[in-house]
Image (cartoon, helix red, strand yellow):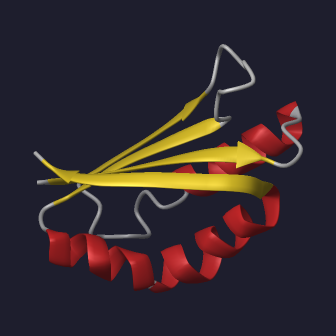
Amino acid sequence: MITHIVLFKLAEPTAENVTATRDKLLSMEGNVDLLRHLEVGVDLIRSERSSDIALTTRFDSLDDLQAYQIHPYHAGVVVPHMKSVCSAIVAVDYEN
């Protein structure tokens, strides 16, 4: 199993932007068949060092994670939205 975690810092973290971005990430459910787990969390603390949204996904293999990166729904719908609303994006991928 491969876990892929991404932290997003929004350029304008208004309630409306946070909700729209969370919903965009959650829309991958049912649209990206490679996903074995999808979880999206919104930061509660809102400190200077906090990210605004966290995405946790799981895949059966590294090959599936790499296929996810170029999947039409992820690459064509989700990624453009995230790039347009985020000031910073960091990720970590690990095997568990």
**Quarter of the rendering containing residue 65:** bottom left
Identified at 69% across, 75% down, the residue is: 80
| Quarter of the figure with the N terminus | bottom left
Question: Where is 90 relative to 7, above or below?
Answer: below
Where residue 29 appears, as percent x and y from the top left, is 43, 57
Question: Where is 68 relative to 43, above or below?
Answer: below
Identified at 48% across, 61% down, the residue is: 28
Identified at 70% across, 44% down, the residue is: 9
Residue in front for this viewpoint, 51 or 30: 51
| Quarter of the figure with the C terminus | top left
Where residue 92 appears, as percent x and y from the top left, is 36, 52
Identity of the residue furthest to the front in this view: 49
Where residue 88 appears, as percent x and y from the top left, is 69, 53
Question: Where is 49 relative to 25, above or below?
Answer: above
Q: In the visual, does 71 lie left or right of 12?
A: left
Identified at 30% across, 70% down, the residue is: 33
Q: In the visual, does 85 lie left or right of 67?
A: right
Residue in front for this viewpoint, 64 or 89: 89
Identity of the residue furthest to the top in this view: 45
Question: Where is 30 relative to 25, above or below?
Answer: below
Q: In the visual, does 19 lie left or right of 79?
A: right
Where residue 14 appears, as percent x and y from the top left, is 89, 35
Labels in figure, total? 0
